[in-house]
Every structure is written in C-alpha cells, then in structure tokens.
Amino acid sequence: MQGNMPPEAQEKIEELQELQETAQQVAEQKEQAQTALNESKTALTALEDVDEDAGMYREIGEVLVETDYESAYDDLENKVDSLEVRVEQLEKQESRVEEQFDELQGELQQMLQGGAGGAPAGPGGPGAGGA
C-alpha cells in the first residue's frame, strides 16, 4: 500500500525533524554570538580612540561602576576572544548537524526507493512492456 510507511522510515523522518530543530537552534545561537562579537569588536575599536585618562564606567547588571581604561580594554579583549571561540564552536556544531542531516536524508531516500522499487504501481509489473 502506498499510504503505509515502514516504521524504520518513520523513525528516520522523526530524526530528521529533530535534527532540523537542532540546526535552527544552533543557527540562532551562532547569530546571537556573532552579533555580540561584532558589537564587542566595535566597542574595542572605539575604545582605542578614547583617551586613557577619560572617566569610564561599565555596566554590571543595572548599575554603572567606575573602571579604568586598562580594565575596560582587557575585559573587552577577553570578551572578543571568548566570543570568537564560541562562534567557531557553533560553526563546527552546525557543520556536524548538517552532515548528520544529509546522511540521514540519504538513508531515508534509499529506504523509500528500495521499498518502492519492489512493488511497482500500475498494470504490468516488471518485464511488462512489449515489442
């Protein structure tokens, strides 16, 4: 019957759906990390143009706390480094998920084509056809 799908194929479809959700979550996390990285790099570049004697404040929660140039610069550098590592990790994770998705999709196609090839639809069947 054409409407029935083997349980193995249904499981693969469910796995594909889960992988697709995972891929979306990873892509969102990567986008957020990339945005934070770009903002931090912009702030670091802007900080390089500021006089080292200028009064500085950093936000901690909802409170502004006075800080010095060197601490602010070091904190931003550390944040940039950390975010670069995070983005790289997310890119690798994204690649792994894509590979798993492609592999699973191929397995599912083989499974479905293998099942459909054994039971052709329509009159005649294998070897039918004349001349």
Image (cartoon, grey):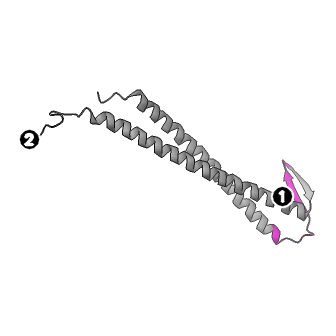
Name the quarter where the C terminus is drawn. Answer: top left
Query: Which of the labelled discs sits on residue 75, or is there none?
Result: 1
Query: Which of the labelled discs sits on residue 26, or is there none?
Result: none
Q: Is residue 52 magenta?
A: yes
Residue visible at 77% across and 68% down in the picture: 45
Examine the rendered structure and indicate whether residue 8 appears above or below residue 73. Answer: above
Give the image location of residue 28, x and y in percent.
61, 48
Give the image location of residue 65, x and y in percent.
91, 54
Label 2: which secondary element: loop
Q: Label 2 amino acid?
A: Gly
Closest to the observer: 120 or 65?
Answer: 120
Residue visible at 56% across and 45% down in the picture: 23
Give the image location of residue 107, x and y in percent.
42, 40
- In the displayed structure image, the side of residue 28 where residue 98 appears, left or right: left
Sequence-wise, the earlier of marks 1 and 2 is: 1
For the residues labelled 1 and 2, the Cα–Cα distance comes to 80 Å
The residue wearing badge 2 is 130
